[in-house]
Amino acid sequence: MERIIIIGGGFAGLNLVKRLDADKFRIMLIDRNNFHCFPPLFYQIASSGLASANICFPFRRELSKRKNVTYHMGHVKNIDIEKKTVTTSYETLEYDRLVIAAGSTNNYFGIDGLSTTTFGIKTVAEACHTRDEILDRLERGAMCKDPERRRELLSFLVVGGGPSGVEIAGALGEMKKYVIPKEYPELTPDDLRITLVEGTGKLLGAMTTHSSQKALDYLMELMVEVRLNTTMKEYKDKYAVFGDGTREYWETVVWTAGIKGEPMPGLPSECITRGGRIAVDEYNRVKGLEGVMAIGDIASMECPDYPHGHPQMAQPAIQQGRNLARNLNEGAFTHAFKYDDKGSMATVGKNKAVADLPGQSFSGFIAWVAWMVIHLLSLLGMRNKATVLLNWMWNYFTYSSSLRLLLRPTRYPERRHWGD
């Protein structure tokens, strides 16, 4: 029985695991977390709209009814192509075929220090950390007696005008407009400064001009300042330097400006292409390597329609996972991957969303409901679906959340056995 190692249990990896024929393969799934998560809702964790457990589901529970499938927790430390082994934080595993579905990570475009000075929403841990930072600043701002220092404490800069940036900026805008007057009597909405900067001339660059303009209008309604054609070149000692040389104080910077492929130690450098992604052919086979495949965000499949690879979103990852499973189950690579673009969506706030579906674009309440339904159905576990729906309904009518909890993790004893 062939041994297949799958690195990464995101949309691509999990769909592949669930569709591989367990009678033909012994499947080993490696992931640094012991759960599958739903990245499109990370911004709601960061803004205290949902708890992290609401959008995560344990791998072991999801895979418990499947035979010949094992889960292995660990960070990938090395891939030995010649010996066909993968070494993690804790063990070395042998494979006959390797599928890399490790996803993506933040791309700081070579700007020094951003990984340690800015906040992100690329993982559950980052989103939780960002949430704690936001709540900490609100509490400290409420106690501050100096108006100038209070405005400094409550200054939030979001870098990047893609879906993640627009959504977290919109969530902060809703807090500014609706939550502050109700729950923070010491503050006024004007005490908060929320600004989103985008390096190009439009928000949501992959979407239509209509959707981009509507997103801009919605953010302005939520008292969010938007600066287009603006890039951040440096962030040091709480001061951001922009492309035009302007230097401004920002207490909290949330980075959503770019992503790149997750580094995979041991892969030959000639396999890596633009944005740290792995070059693959139309069957998701890594070019130049026998028995190694890559799917999802980390895979770059260049074709006439997508000369720089497919969008790093959920749908291409899901479809690549399913297509690769089909080829592997049949024992031959006969089905080339063809991306079926089902459209793009983004939400800015309650009743404020944009959607580009094949043949039409729409916005407002209908787009917001469609966004909610699609995301709700995509979650794993009925309990998660029910809990998220209940949270959304409660927040819709009250703008009140019991999840604005500042949870600082203890520092000691150090958890060295977790590995990095």
Image: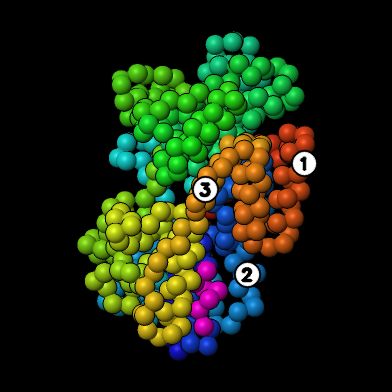
Where does label 1 land, which residue?
394
Please say if the residues under marks 1 and 3 sit with CB atoms less than 8 Å apart.
Answer: no
Residue 174 appears left or right of 241: right
Query: Which region of the structure is painted magenta?
Result: 15-21
x, y percent for residue 114: 39, 36
Q: What residue is at 65 percent from the left and 69 percent from the top?
A: 61
Assess disc 2: are there few (<14), some (14-19) or many (≥20) residues with their C-alpha within 10 Å of its C-alpha: some
- Asked if 124 appears above or below 112 in the picture, the reply is below
| Quadrant housing the C terminus | bottom left
Where does label 3 land, which residue?
360
Closer to the chain start, of discs 1 and 3, is 3
Q: CA distance from mark 3 to mark 2?
A: 36 Å
Question: Residue 18 magenta-drawn?
Answer: yes
Q: Mark 1, mark 3: which one is toward the viewer?
A: 3
Q: Amino acid at mark 1?
A: Trp
Closer to the chain start, of discs 3 and 2, is 2
Q: CA distance from mark 2 to mark 1?
A: 28 Å
- Asked if 383 appears above or below 42 in the picture, the reply is below
Closer to the chain start, of discs 2 and 1, is 2
